[in-house]
Amino acid sequence: MMQSKIKAWLRAWLPYVAVMVLLFWGVNAWRARDVPNLAPDWQASTVNGDATSLTQIRALYPNQTIALIFWAEWCPICRTEEGSISNLTQDKTLAFIPIATQSGNAQNVRRIFKERGLNWNAVVDESGEIFRSYQLVGVPAFIVINPDGTVRNVQTGYTSEAGMRLRMR
């Protein structure tokens, strides 16, 4: 009896779930449509004041996938990802680079991190120049870059920690 109820429920709701999945996939594909195939290089400073670039990060992680997460202090969805980002930045086996975009200068970002208890050495993209170089249309945005520098995956909007980890593999 219970099994037939489950089957009936699945038959009734599966089409709606499928439409929602396709809708979310389509919206993400549309938002990521202009992201270049080859990851643009950039130079910036981190919250800790260190100069860095995508070329330097790729040299630190040879033959490894690199993930960039564009985050903004004013973004409520980004705020929901902060715990996941913290966990991923602490995993030293991953090349996971948070980029604080359009969130002020390094001093402002450091203050925000201190207030929120975040211990990230994020790249500071004060003007949004790095963000625009990837032709993104919203934050948060998660980009996976292959070892050869090609962009493998782009996810806009909320991404769970598990989703980020799976995309990096």
Image (spheres, grey):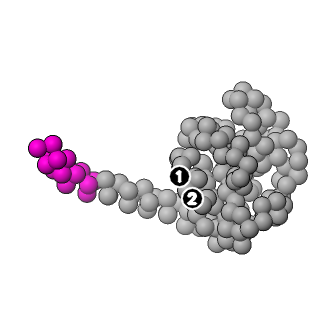
Q: Nearer the viewer, residue 56 or 24?
A: 56
Does the rendering let one see residue 82? Answer: yes
In the image, residue 136 lies at what x, y percent?
A: 62, 58
In the image, residue 69 lies at what x, y percent?
A: 66, 51
The residue singled out by tag 1 in the image is 163
Q: Residue at x 68, y 63 (%)?
A: 65
Three-letter amino acid code of the residue under disc 1: Gly
Residue 23 lies in the magenta-colored region: no
The residue sitting at the right extreme is 50
Q: In the drawing, what numbered circle is on residue 79?
A: none
Query: In terms of image quadrants, where is residue 1?
Result: top left
In the image, residue 84 lies at what x, y percent?
A: 60, 42
Q: What stretch is highlighted in magenta?
A: 1-16
| As drawn, 30 above or below 115 | below
Three-letter amino acid code of the residue under disc 2: Arg
Q: Which residue is drawn at 58% across and 52% down?
A: 164
Q: In the drawing, what numbered circle is on residue 167?
A: 2
